[in-house]
Image (cartoon, rainbow, N blue to C red):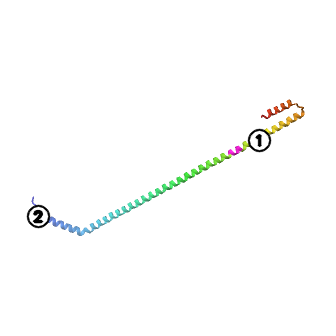
Amino acid sequence: MDIDISIVLMTLVNFFILVLILKHFFWEKIQLTIEERQNYVDEKLIKADEDSQKAKMYLLENQRILQSAKEEGKKITEKQKEKGNKIYQEIIDNANEEAKSLLERAKVEIQREKEKAEYEVKKQAVDLAVQLSIKALEENMDESKHRQLIGDFITKVGM
């Protein structure tokens, strides 16, 4: 294969002429377009970095808010638990006081009933003694009759 130098030279000359024509008419436009494109890409990269920083900042802020909400929730839960325990204790205390009050009233009522029963027994004993005295005065009694009346009296009194 033979290489023809004239063809190679002509091709090189044509290439350089083409490059000169392209450089003269299109080089600046191509350069401007490339620069615009490079600026556009740089702006998008900067904006992406800014957006990434904002997203990280928002993520940290959201985590802080979430943690704060969790702590506030714990505080509210603890307050409600304490309030519930306080109410529970108040109910228990009130129930104990009511039970003590009922017990005291029952004791007072029992004491009254006891005193009333004792009064009735004494009253009956006095009535029986009066009746016995009346019978003893009405009758002439000898000692056996007198003992019999006392025996009847003791039987009626229940001693």
Give residue 150's quadrant in the image: top right
Mark 1 crowdedness (10 Å alpha carbons): few <14, some 14-19, many ≥20: few
Q: Nearer the viewer, residue 126 or 88?
A: 126
**Is 24 on the left or on the right of 91, as rendered?**
left
Q: Quadrant of the N terminus?
A: bottom left
Gap between marks 2 and 1, in whole Å? 152 Å
- Give the residue furthest to the left: 2
User: Label 1 amino acid?
Assistant: Lys
Quadrant containing the C terminus in the rendered view: top right
Q: Is residue 120 above or below residue 42?
A: above
Q: Is residue 36 above or below residue 109?
A: below
Q: Secondary structure at mark 2?
A: helix
Report the number of discs: 2
- Segment tinted magenta in the rendering: 102-107
For image coordinates 80% across by 39% down, the residue present is 122
Q: Residue at x 44, y 57 (%)?
A: 63
The residue carrying pointer 2 sits among few (fewer than 14), some (14 to 19) or many (20 or more) residues within 10 Å by Cα, namely few
Residue corresponding to mark 1: 116
Q: Look at the picture and state if 80 lies above or below 123.
A: below
Find the residue positioned furthest to the top. 144
Q: Is residue 49 left or right of residue 141?
A: left
Q: Name the residue rendered at 61%, 50% in the picture.
A: 90
Horizontal and vertical percent position of residue 84: 57, 50
Residue 77 image point, x, y percent = 53, 52
Location of residue 144 in the rendering, given as x and y in whole percent from the top left corner: 85, 29
Near-viewer residue (79 or 32): 79
Kindly report the secondary structure that dominates the magenta region of the rendered protein: helix
What numbered label is drawn on residue 5?
A: 2
Residue at 78 percent across and 41 percent down: it is 119
Residue 74: horizontal and vertical position, in percent? Answer: 50, 53
Quarter of image, res 116 = top right
